[in-house]
Amino acid sequence: MMTIDEMLQANPHAPHNDSEALQMARQLHVPKDTQMAKMVPLDEFASEEDEGIEDSCGESSLGILEATLASSLISEEARAEINTLISDSQPSLDQDKTIGHFRFHWTETSEDARDNVTESEIDATGEILNQWWTRFSTDFREPKADLVDGTRRIDIDVYYRDRLHGSTSSHSNRIFLRSTSVVSDDCRRLTTTAHELFHRVEYSYGYVTGTAKQKWWVEALGSWSQKYCNANQFDYLSRVNAGFLKPEKGLLTRSYDACHFWKWFSERLQQSDAFNHEHDAVREFMEEHRTNGNNAEIACRKIVEDMGGYPSFDAFFTHWSVSNHVKRLRDPNGSTDHRFGYADASATAINCHRSYGPMRNVPYTTDETITDDTFHWVSPSLSVREYASRYVNFMVESGVDQTRITIVASGNVSASLIQQDNSRWLNVDERLAVTTHNWDLDLSSQEVSRIVIAVSGLSGGGQFHIEVNP
Ligand SMILES: [Zn+2]
């Protein structure tokens, strides 16, 4: 086990001394009077989906600062100054009430009206959090909590702060929930509570806040839990769509925008003999992480290969990258697709006046039209990062009878050729460990109107180019 000091020193995004910690604290903890002078309008989060990613959970930002306070990397003077910054950024929370496993701290009389919530909103939040407590304790492990008089207990602080809906950290037994956008919001009261409490489940599987390079599962599964707990809430789709819109980003460097990976992971592995429920593979992944020395990448690989029925993680990843393009198409018979589909792929919903879905299409790296049998084209040399994908699109004009498409790759690359019409995929050919491959295609039946090549970087990534009728 690493100490907190070692863990922070291994994280390039964490502060390592007084001045870095103070700078971070000043950015994160804006004094209450400055916040009030600014008065960000209350509807700032109305169009979340279009804005893409916002940092709506402070697990990795406020959490790293908490880890720093718990470390010996900073002086006592800096610690005292940071604690003052933190208390100056918050109203005094003069009300408290314990509901089941949660002890709430809130105010109804702050000078900044955005801090204030009602006791009935606290009661509603308490009821929901206790529901998630039971659900997580049954399906996973008990969330990390204090032990007070024989009862597991988490403190919940409710007030207003910019940018964050919620936050928590493994270095304390508290959760912050924003007054306006969560506790007073009938929808995020359901989803942000699940997200933050799920982080505390992750702590029970050995994850420590501030550990470098863990967001791809820590934040993404937090977002996944929002839907897992709430069949009718779709705010998680803004995370899913942020992922679809940036396929060129490597899986292990993702954050919330790896939500689509875990959604597919849980749905796909549910189809294997080893698992019955959607959450089973997620639980086994976290259990493996707990027992293998907290290596999430190896845990994910092992669950896919040993229990998921896939010959390799690379085969799984390649199949996923095809699915990210194919997800809203029907199968060749015109039926709903269970091989490449995602649950909710076409779902749209309005939750608390915010609209979500449907799932967005992945963007194409290049976009060409094959006009006739002699059409010739060579792509530039393209690179694809480790566990990332690129999509090369060809529209096919009617009258094209045959074409040859060649990929030449170096490094560690897989490539899949997808033939489709407007509503169905017609043929998918997935190839691992590609160096040079020719696809000779007979298009004379005229069904194929589009050909997409999904190229994925496997371990280490690679380079490739594509040629038509070389
Ligand atoms: Zn989070």
Image: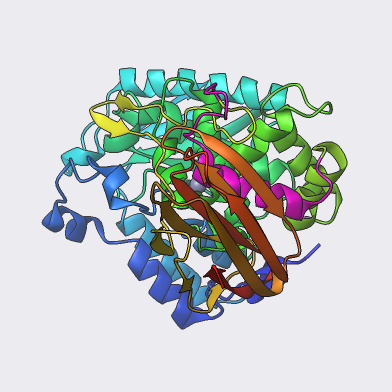
Residue 449 placed where, x, y %? Answer: 43, 44
**In the depicted view, which residue is nearer to us: 152 or 458?**
458
| x and y percentages locating residue 129 in the rendered image | 51, 25
Residue 449 lies left or right of residue 407; in this view the side is left
Give the residue displayed 49% in from the left and 80% down from the top: 18
Given residues 340 and 115, the one toward you in this image is 340
What residue is at 17 percent from the left and 38 percent from the top?
113
320 drawn magenta? yes
Res 71 seen here: no
Q: Indicate the quadrant where residue 410 lies.
A: bottom right
Q: Give how far across and how far down residue 236 sits, in percent.
A: 44, 37
Magenta stretch in the rendered image: 310-336
Q: Is residue 342 visible?
A: yes
Q: Is residue 208 left or right of residue 164?
A: right
Q: Position of residue 465 (x, y in %)?
A: 56, 74
Question: What is the tally of numbered marks visible in this picture?
Answer: 0
In the image, residue 94 above or below residue 230: below
| Residue for point 64% across, 37% down | 145
From the image, which quarter does the C terminus lie in?
Answer: bottom right
Residue 122 colored magenta?
Answer: no
In which quarter of the view is residue 270 placed?
top right
In this rendering, the answer to whether 170 lies above or below 101 is: below
